[in-house]
Image (tube, rainbow, N blue to C red):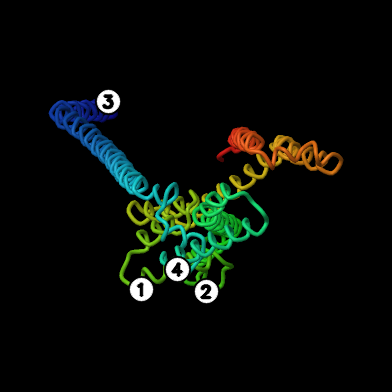
C-alpha cells in the first residue's frame, strides 16, 4: 500500500513537471516578445525624451540667435543714427550751440550783441592808444572771436555740470525701477527734482513724450542739446532695451558705473598732465614778463618795438610763433577719455 502511494506521488510530480515544462515551452515566445516590447517601449520613451531635450535646446539656441540678431540690427541702426547726430557734438549750427550753452536767445539777437561787442572793443582799443592798423583786428575779435568764445566756455561749463550730476540721476532711476516704478515716472521725477542742467534735459524728454514721441527716441535726442558721449550712451541703452528687452535697472546701473569710472579716469589724466600745463603756462608767460620788466628798468630800450613799424612786425611775428607753440603744447596735453 505504501509502495503504491509512493509510485502514485512520483507519477503526479512527474506529470506536473511535464505540464509545467510544456507550458513554459509554449509560453516562451510570448514572454520573450513581451520583454522585447518592454525594452522597445523604454527605448522609444528615452528617444522621445532625448528628442524633446534636443528640441528645447534648439529652441533656446534659435531664440538666443534671434535676440542676438535683433541686438545687432539695433546697434547698426543706432550707429547710423549716431553718425547723423555726431555733427551736433563736433560742429553744431549756431542756434544749437546757443541751446547747448543754456542761452535762450535767437540767432539774430546774438548777431546784434556780437556787433555791439565789436564796436565796444574797437572803441576801447582806440581810446587806449592802439595803432590804427590794430583797430580792424580788434573789430574782428569783438565780432567773431569774443562772443563765440563766451558761448564755447558756457557750453563746456554746462557739459561739465551735467556730467557731475548725471550718474546720480541714473542711480535714482535704477532704484525707482527696482522698486517697481515705471521708467516714465522715474524720468518725470528726475525732471522735477534733479539739479541743473540734468533737470532741463530730462524735462525736454518729458515734453517730447507729451508730444507723442517714444521714450527711446526722446532719449536719443538728448545728445543734440547735451554734446557729450554720456548722453548718447543713455539714449543707446534705452533704445536697445525698448527693442530687444532685458533688465533695464541692471543696464542703467552698469552705465552709471561706467560714467563714474570715466570721470575718475579724466581726473587722473588731468592730475598727471598738470606738470606739463604748468610748464606751458610758465613758458607762455615768460616773454610777457621779461618785456614788462625790461620796460620798467629801461623803457627807452624796448619802446622801439611799439613805436616803429619794424618793431610792430617783430611783435606780430613773435606773437604768431608763440601762439603756434602754445597751440601745439595744448594739443599734446589734451587727452580724450
Q: Residues within 10 Å of mark 3 (few under 14, many from 20)?
A: few
Camera-near label (3 vs 4) is 4
Q: Quadrant of residue 309?
A: top right
Q: Which mark is residue 109?
A: 4
Task: Name the N-terminal-most of marks 2 and 1.
Answer: 2
Camera-near label (3 vs 1) is 1
Q: Is residue 65 toward the left or the right of residue 183 in the image? A: left
Label 1 sits on residue: 210
Along the viewing direction, whichever of 127 and 283 lies nearer the viewer: 127
Give the SS element for disc 4: helix
> Which residue shows up at 37% across the image and 47% down it?
82
Q: Quadrant of the C terminus?
A: top right
Label 3 sits on residue: 3
Camera-near label (2 vs 3) is 2
- Work out how far the residue at label 2 is from the one at label 1, CA to CA, in angstroms: 15 Å
Q: Is any atom of residue 326 visible in this view?
A: no
- Work out how far the residue at label 3 is from the one at label 1, CA to CA, in angstroms: 115 Å
Q: Is residue 14 above or below residue 314?
A: above
Q: Is residue 79 toward the left or the right of residue 167 in the image? A: left
> Which residue shows up at 45% across the image and 56% down it?
248
Label 2 sits on residue: 192
> Which residue shows up at 72% across the image and 38% down it?
304
Residue 126 in picture, x, y percent from top left:
62, 57
Give the SS element for disc 3: helix
Task: Name the N-terminal-most of marks 2 and 4.
Answer: 4
Task: Name the N-terminal-most of marks 1 and 4.
Answer: 4
Residue 331 in picture, x, y percent from top left:
58, 35
Along the viewing direction, whichever of 265 and 135 lies nearer the viewer: 135
Q: Is residue 212 toward the left or the right of residue 327 in the image? A: left
Amino acid at each position: 500500500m505504501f509502495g503504491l502511494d509512493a509510485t502514485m506521488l512520483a507519477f503526479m510530480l512527474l506529470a506536473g513537471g511535464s505540464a509545467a515544462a510544456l507550458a513554459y515551452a509554449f509560453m516562451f515566445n510570448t514572454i520573450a516578445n513581451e520583454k522585447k516590447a518592454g525594452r522597445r517601449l523604454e527605448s522609444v520613451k528615452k528617444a522621445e525624451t532625448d528628442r524633446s531635450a534636443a528640441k528645447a535646446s534648439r529652441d533656446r539656441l534659435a531664440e538666443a540667435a534671434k535676440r542676438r540678431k535683433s541686438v545687432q540690427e539695433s546697434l547698426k541702426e543706432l550707429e547710423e543714427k549716431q553718425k547723423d547726430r555726431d555733427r551736433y557734438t563736433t560742429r553744431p549750427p549756431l542756434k544749437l550751440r546757443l541751446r547747448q550753452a543754456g542761452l535762450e536767445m535767437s540767432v539774430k539777437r546774438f548777431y546784434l550783441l556780437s556787433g555791439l561787442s565789436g564796436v565796444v572793443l574797437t572803441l576801447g582799443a582806440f581810446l587806449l592808444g592802439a595803432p590804427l592798423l590794430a583797430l580792424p583786428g580788434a573789430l574782428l575779435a569783438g565780432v567773431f572771436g569774443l562772443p563765440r568764445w563766451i558761448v564755447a566756455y558756457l557750453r563746456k561749463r554746462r557739459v561739465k555740470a551735467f556730467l557731475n550730476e548725471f550718474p546720480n540721476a541714473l542711480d535714482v532711476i535704477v532704484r525707482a525701477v527696482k522698486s517697481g516704478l515705471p521708467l516714465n515716472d522715474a524720468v518725470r521725477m528726475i525732471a522735477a527734482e534733479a539739479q541743473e542742467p540734468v533737470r532741463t534735459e530730462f524735462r525736454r524728454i518729458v515734453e517730447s513724450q507729451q508730444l507723442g514721441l517714444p521714450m527711446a527716441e526722446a532719449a536719443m535726442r538728448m545728445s543734440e542739446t547735451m554734446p557729450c558721449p554720456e548722453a548718447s550712451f543713455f539714449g543707446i541703452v534705452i533704445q536697445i532695451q525698448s527693442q530687444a528687452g532685458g533688465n533695464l535697472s541692471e543696464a542703467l546701473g552698469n552705465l552709471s558705473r561706467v560714467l563714474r569710472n570715466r570721470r575718475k579716469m579724466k581726473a587722473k589724466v588731468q592730475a598727471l598732465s598738470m606738470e606739463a600745463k604748468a610748464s606751458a603756462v610758465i613758458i607762455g608767460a615768460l616773454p610777457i614778463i621779461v618785456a614788462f620788466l625790461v620796460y620798467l628798468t629801461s623803457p627807452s630800450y624796448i619802446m622801439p618795438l611799439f613805436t616803429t613799424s619794424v618793431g610792430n612786425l617783430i611783435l606780430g611775428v613773435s606773437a604768431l610763433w608763440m601762439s603756434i607753440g602754445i597751440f601745439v603744447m595744448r594739443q599734446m596735453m589734451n587727452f580724450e577719455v
